[in-house]
Image: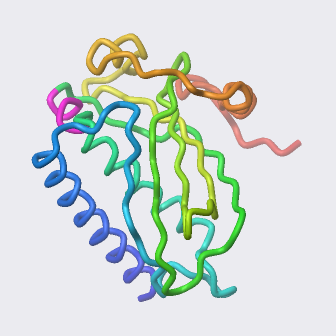
Amino acid sequence: MKEALRTMNLLWRMILVHLRATRLLRRDGNLSLTGVSVIKLTTLPTDIDILRHMNNGRYLSLADLGRWDLVVRIGVFARTQQLGWIPVLSQASATFRKPLVVGQRFELQTRMIGTDDRAVVMEQRFVRDEEIHMRLITRTRFVKRAGGIVTIDELHEQFGTIPDEVPDWVHGWADASRLASTKQQLPSDWT
């Protein structure tokens, strides 16, 4: 039952974020590719774990809301729908600093910080009282509904060049933690 409540909670939050982002897009026009998306959230009882702070997995689920808000507001969502492209999270690195507890209001700030040879790199921050509680770096690739991967050149052609502010350590992390291509076998062998 609790899992069903958590799922519905996220679904309603996603619908509300989408509606708000669409309204802001219509009212204000596209957010720039370097713009920061900010959504205000509250830590709900369904977000916490037994230790009474936000569950580490919930941060990742809520981060989806921030990425969704950003792609709608910069106009990427509508255009990728027309092109038949689907964004897929390929890597994430989370750093937890301070807990969020029930009832606390916070901001989820999201922005693109650049691209590498394969993906769009975003930074997300969970901020309360102007202080970062958690930071997430993600890499997102786009796949084509018809099959295949969208190249970075294709992305730049559609949306313009995304200024590159990706720190060197992020490139190193992405290379070091990358798994084999889905076209290759990758057995789970612990030996």
Instruction: Return the x and y of residue 43 as percentages of the image width and height.
Output: 48, 79
Magenta stretch containing residue 80, yes or no?
Answer: yes
Pick the residue in front: 7 or 111: 111
The furthest residue to the left: 26
Image quadrant assignment for residue 10: bottom left
Q: Quadrant of the C terminus?
A: top right
Establish if 8 lies above or below 51: above
Which span is picked out in magenta? Answer: 77-82
Q: Residue at x 31, y 41 (%)?
A: 71
What number of labels is visible?
Answer: 0
Q: Could you say where residue 20 lies in the image, as x and y percent from the top left?
A: 21, 60
Q: Is 31 situated left or right of 47 in this image? A: left
Nearest the viewer among 5 and 109 is 109
Is 90 in the magenta?
Answer: no
Residue visible at 49% across and 86% down?
A: 103
Residue 154 sits above or below residue 13 on the image:
above
- Main secondary structure along the magenta-highlighted residues: helix
**Residue 16 point in image, percent of width and height:** 23, 66
Horizontal and vertical percent for residue 138?
Answer: 55, 41
Q: Residue drawn at (50%, 38%), measured in percent from left and top?
A: 122
Task: Please name whichever residue, 21 or 7, is drawn nearer the observer in this view of the structure.
Answer: 21
In the image, is residue 45 above or below residue 96? below
The answer to whether 58 appears left or right of 156 in the picture is: right
Would you place residue 26 above or below residue 84 in this image? below
Residue at the outermost right position:
191
**Measuring 50% from the left and 78% from the top, which residue is drawn there?**
47
Work out which quarter of the rendered image holds the N terminus and state it: bottom left
Does residue 66 appear to the left or right of 83 in the view shown? right
- Is 30 on the left-hand or right-hand side of 175? left
